[in-house]
Image: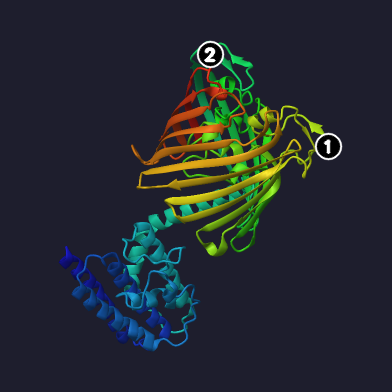
């Protein structure tokens, strides 16, 4: 095979020599334009063959052929004075071409002198890959157009037709490919024109998510009571089929900023799952079911604008932001539609009395692009309400309403509010440590909380993680209390197949002596099966021991089949 390729290329070299002999016979050796044409023909045939067989020839054979090619290139260079052809991108600026490459001088002749054999839009030449018939047709057509321009400029004796017969045959042989290439190009141009005319926006992208979930559960014993001893249920709830839909319109005006608008809806508030009925106070509900807590109504879930103040410092500000989008994140227990679904297992429960959207701002600083990150957040859940003593529903944690059932207090931007600061140390993709402070006013009473959040991937597939929180809430219905919180778990990635997740976690959301006579414990096991990049199916098992901090309550068991669609 190598001998056949070598023989073919040597025949083309011989054709190049014959072209030069024709020059001498017809006495046009010194006529610059026609000489360009002949040498160009030789170089086309030589280079198209050499570039297609580069990976096949041995080093000695490449050097021999390169010597012949360079001889013709140098002879042409010595005869060239002022080349009228406008250069596009010089060969030396192509990313994958070096002066030491064996075909470098040949490329100089074809591309930079004749603007004939061009590269790809990404500024590469890709000389080590085979050329397709379409690419060959395009190259020959471009070179023929250059030849025609030379012929049009010539004022002297023209080159003989016999000297161009090979190029003419090539044009004829590839007429179909050239026509197809032209038709395909025109078709693409028409499609681009249609897209530009019909596109929604040149600056906005649409991202969407839909969640379907089937949920059912029950409990041991005769009845369940809440932390105040009031009966919650005396029979098991019915199975439910719930949904959530969120559409994000993400707009960027400068490439480094983001204006987000989220439109969302959902089914039956947050009481469309069994644990929301059987244990609603200490975070046993399905977290994704309350984001948003809508009852088939369409609403606005996010409105904010993020931008870079200076390098490594960004600011997000808006009338509808959520603290959990920025603070207390964890790679293994964070997103309830992907990881654990139990609310008190995906964030530090006692540190977020404000658990929902509100007006405010978040400042994020990554000094020098290092492993350290600092975040500071301020949020007011009823920032658009100027009332000094408002009363009514607020996007707060349910335990906040348990502690302060009167629901009274000043609203607006500086009334009911929460401020948070988080320090993160993230030296590698396998380890992160976050320290958290949270404080503010809930229904005109003060609260403070501190927390720690860590994750450690001890292998390529497995990781451990956990959170701890300590808080202080003043003047509650149970007095001044100091609830504790903790959770820990094990997670596996790509265990059965690429893209899947599985996890098990346990935690106690509200450890405090003043409420109930026991401590509630939550356990969850899930497996997230990735059907593809856009569909994930997850069976989820939840178990709640001593729900509502009441020892007399029986154990709760619930199961959920969660399906998430991304688009």
Considering only vertical position in the picture, is 160 above or below 450? below
| Image spot of residue 245 (x, y percent) | 59, 32
Label disc, if present, on residue 387 of the rendered structure = 1
| Image spot of residue 181 (x, y percent) | 43, 55
> Looking at this view, is 178 or 560 the one in front?
560
> Looking at this view, is 110 or 385 the one in front?
385
| Image spot of residue 302 (x, y percent) | 66, 41
Considering only vertical position in the picture, is 187 above or below 26? above
Disc 1, disc 2: CB below 8 Å?
no
Residue in the image at 62% along x and 60% along y: 313
Badge 1: residue crowd in 10 Å (few <14, some 14–19, many ≥20): some
Mark yes or no: residue 274 visible: yes
Residue in the image at 80% along x and 38% along y: 410
Question: If you read the primary sequence from the N terminus, does the residue marked by circle 1 or circle 2 appear first?
Answer: 2
Q: Secondary structure at mark 1?
A: loop
| Image spot of residue 155 (x, y percent) | 47, 83
Q: Secondary structure at mark 2?
A: loop
Q: Quadrant of residue 242?
A: top right
> Looking at this view, is 129 or 24 the one in front?
129
- Which residue is label 2 attached to? 236
Residue in the image at 49% along x and 79% along y: 153
Mark yes or no: residue 538 visible: no
Residue in the image at 35% along x and 79% along y: 39
Scheme of colours in the image: rainbow
Badge 2: residue crowd in 10 Å (few <14, some 14–19, many ≥20): some
Q: Quadrant of the N terminus?
A: bottom left
> Looking at this view, is 300 or 285 the one in front?
285
């Amino acid at each position: 095979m190598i001998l056949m390729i070598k023989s073919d290329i040597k025949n083309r070299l011989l054709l190049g020599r014959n072209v030069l002999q024709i020059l001498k016979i017809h006495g046009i050796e010194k006529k610059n334009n026609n000489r360009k044409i002949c040498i160009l023909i030789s170089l086309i045939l030589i280079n198209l063959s050499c570039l297609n067989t580069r990976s096949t020839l041995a080093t000695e054979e490449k050097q021999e052929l390169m010597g012949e090619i360079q001889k013709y290139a140098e002879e042409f260079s010595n005869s060239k004075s002022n080349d009228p052809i406008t250069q596009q991108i010089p060969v030396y600026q192509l990313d994958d071409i070096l002066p030491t490459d064996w075909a470098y001088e040949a490329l100089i002749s074809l591309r930079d002198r004749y603007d004939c054999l061009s590269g790809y839009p990404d500024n590469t030449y890709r000389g080590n890959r085979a050329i397709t018939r379409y690419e060959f047709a395009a190259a020959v057509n471009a070179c023929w157009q250059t030849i025609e321009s030379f012929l049009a400029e010539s004022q002297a004796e023209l080159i003989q037709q016999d000297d161009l017969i090979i190029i003419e045959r090539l044009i004829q042989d590839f007429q179909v490919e050239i026509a197809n290439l032209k038709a395909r190009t025109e078709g693409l141009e028409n499609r681009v024109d249609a897209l530009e005319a019909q596109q929604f926006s040149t600056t906005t992208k649409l991202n969407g998510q839909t969640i379907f979930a089937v949920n059912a559960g029950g409990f041991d014993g005769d009845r369940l009571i809440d932390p105040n001893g009031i009966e919650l249920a005396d029979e098991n709830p019915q199975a439910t089929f719930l949904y959530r839909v969120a559409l994000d319109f993400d707009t960027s005006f400068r490439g480094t900023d983001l204006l987000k608008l989220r439109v969302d809806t959902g089914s039956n508030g947050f009481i469309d799952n069994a644990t929301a009925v059987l244990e609603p106070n200490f975070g046993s509900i399905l977290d994704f079911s309350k984001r948003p807590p809508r009852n088939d109504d369409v609403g606005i879930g996010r409105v904010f604008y993020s931008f870079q103040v200076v390098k490594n410092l960004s600011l997000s500000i808006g009338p509808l932001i959520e603290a959990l989008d920025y603070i207390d994140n964890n790679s293994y227990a964070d997103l309830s539609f992907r990881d654990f679904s139990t609310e008190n297992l995906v964030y530090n429960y006692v540190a977020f009395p404000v658990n929902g959207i509100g007006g405010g701002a978040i400042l994020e600083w990554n000094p020098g692009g290092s492993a350290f990150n600092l975040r500071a957040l301020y949020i007011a859940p009823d920032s658009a309400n100027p009332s000094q003593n408002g009363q009514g529903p607020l996007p707060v944690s349910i335990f906040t309403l348990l502690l302060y059932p009167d629901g009274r207090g000043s609203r607006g931007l500086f009334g009911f509010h929460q401020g948070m600061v988080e320090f993160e140390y993230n030296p590698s993709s396998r380890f992160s440590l976050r320290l958290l402070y949270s404080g503010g006013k809930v229904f005109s009473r003060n609260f403070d909380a501190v927390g720690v959040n860590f994750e450690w991937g001890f292998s390529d597939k497995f990781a451990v993680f956990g959170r701890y929180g300590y808080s202080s809430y003043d003047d509650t219905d149970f007095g001044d209390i100091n609830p504790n919180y903790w959770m820990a778990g094990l997670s596996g990635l790509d265990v059965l197949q690429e893209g899947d997740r599985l996890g098990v976690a346990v935690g106690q959301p509200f450890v405090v002596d003043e409420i109930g006579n026991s401590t509630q414990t939550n356990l969850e096991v899930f497996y997230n099966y990735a059907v593809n990049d856009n569909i994930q199916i997850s069976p989820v098992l939840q178990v709640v021991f001593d729900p509502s901090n009441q020892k007399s309550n029986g154990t709760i068991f619930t199961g959920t089949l969660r399906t998430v669609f991304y688009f």
